[in-house]
Image: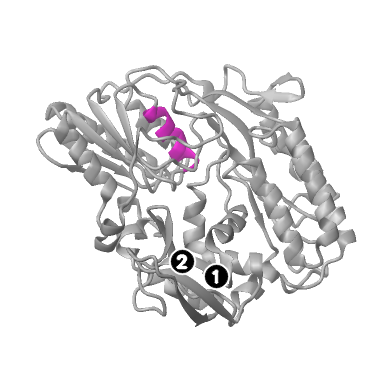
Amino acid sequence: MKITTLLFVSFILFSNLAISQSVDDAFSQKKMRKDLAVFKEIRLKANSGLYKYRTTQQIDSIYSWADAEIEQLSTYRDFYNLISTLTDFEGSLHNDTSVPDRIWQNLRSEKSGYFPLPIKCIEEKWIINYENGAIPLGAEIVSINEIPFKEVILNLYKYYTTDGENLTGKKIGIRTHFSRYFRLNYGLKEEFIVRYKLQKSSEILTKTIASVSHSNYYKNLQNRYSKSFDDIYYATLTEKQKYNFKKIDSETGKLTIYTFDMGDEKAVEHLNYVKFLDSIFIRLKDENIKNLIVDVRQNGGGTDPNDIVTYSYLTQRNFQENKKAWISFKKIPLLKYYNIGAPKFIRPFGVGKYNKEFQEIFPVEVDNRFYQDENSNDRKIWTPNKNAFNGNVYLLVSPAIASAGSLFAAMLAGNENTITVGEETMGGYHGHNGHTSLEYKLPKSKIVTQFSVVNLEQDVPKKDNQLLNRGIIPDYKVIQTYEDYLKQEDTQLEFVYDLINSK
């Protein structure tokens, strides 16, 4: 099931509402309190994931903290950081909070104030991921402007949401947007005093480096040292780049799926993908392949039914997309804050068909929750494909896996014939909030908040190593070594090869 994010034709080309032009402008505490109250009301009435990983007491507590915290705040940036903290606390990778376009454009045009060098986490250390810069490649960052770097990272986690209490996935966002996040949290800085250590040295060195513009940081990111190794994560993929198969030897093959973004069951791209899967799994059977490596380390999600169809070729059990799914409203609430250009008095007419669709898909009301029934396509019983693989499966996972990618990986990780290798995913094992996205705009700050409203329980078996509030935990935790980083080699894949050979 997918309901397309609600889109409406805008009746207003240019907003006549006065909003802050700079994220550092003053912003009154009165406006903060108004928007905080609206933000909380939106979460309570529309967001089924509010209590997925948090108790009522925890949610009440953080909102009490936020209300008291406003006494210490004075700028738009302060308030944005407060709302970002609340957004992240819920624990859903589909949550997002963003500033209005005019402020965003202002950030992008800033000519200085940004940290210049890309970074990356290797062996649990944050290092400089840039060659021939002011600080040597691979140097471990100890502090910036006298702030311990561990504290910096903790303060930036709020900008990149993940499922439950997962932290590994946050490293993906931080390695990409570190300079922007640092600017949002700490403000513009004309220079940075960086304390760092070279590899295999305990000596702490110091270097003062000048700031760069927003755009120049991203130019440096495009020239990061690890680009040849991790560029697929950032790339816009053509259809032919989204998946591939390689035969490793007479007994082993490797299926790589970078994304499930291939359209729905009627799309030509989806139909081509199914033909590809069928040809590959017939080949695996005909050639008596015993080991299959399934690499979804860069898979951030996509559309149904690509994830489910793929799993049907890799299981011996009947299954469903989910065991349970529900939303927290019968009609889309708080339309006056919904982020569309249509005048408020027109909005109820525009959402009528969407409310009807919600009611058809979630017809069963229990304790103010609205559930799917047995007629839902998501509750459909799938059977294994006739060419399904029944040999040894080695699943490669990483913190980049999310949404439909993590649903697929969780189901595959639950199979008895699967060994999972890599790092914890940002997407949850047991479930997530997904499918339909709603987007609201706070009235005073114009901050936009977006979240997925369908609370899903995935059809996966209980396993001792899979926790309710975390991503998929691998059977073997394997991270890229520093030596392999310098050589741009794949530590995890080599581990799997060794594992197969040892058996």
Is the C terminus in the top left, top right, bottom left or bottom right quadrant?
Answer: top left
- Graded by Cα atoms within 10 Å as few (under 14), some (14 to 19) or many (20 or more), the crowding at tag 2 reads many
Left or right: 492 in relation to 453: left
Mark identifier at residue 144: 1
Say left or right for 452 vs 502.
right
In magenta segment, residue 32: no
- Residue at 11% x, 30% y: name it: 287
| Above or below, 73 relative to 167 | below
Residue 343 is situated, as x and y percent measured from the top left of the image, at 82, 55
In the image, residue 86 above or below residue 319: below
Q: Give the magenta range.
A: 402-413
* Circles 1, 2 touching at the beta carbon (< 8 Å): yes
Vertical order, 174 against 186 (above or below): above
Label 1 element class: strand
Query: Which amino acid is tagged 1?
Result: Ile
Q: Main secondary structure of the magenta part?
A: helix
- Most extreme residue toward the right, as rendered? 30
Residue named by callout 2? 141
Instruction: Report x, y in % for residue 268.
Output: 38, 43
Q: How is the image coloured?
A: one colour
Report whether 195 appears left or right of 296: right
Crowdedness near tag 1: few (<14), some (14–19) or many (≥20) residues, C-alpha within 10 Å: some
At 66% across and 54% down in the image, what residue appears? 97
Q: Residue at horizontal 52%, vertical 64%? A: 178
Q: Nearer the viewer, residue 67 or 403?
A: 67
Total number of numbered labels?
Answer: 2
The quadrant of the rendering that contains the N terminus is top right
Q: Quadrant of residue 319?
A: top left
Residue 404 forms part of the magenta stretch: yes
Instruction: Inspect the image, locate mark 2, and give the three-letter code of the amino acid beneath it.
Output: Ile
Location of residue 293 by image quarter: top left
Instruction: Please give the name of the residue rendered at 27% of the width and 49% of the height, measured from the top-left corner.
Output: 491
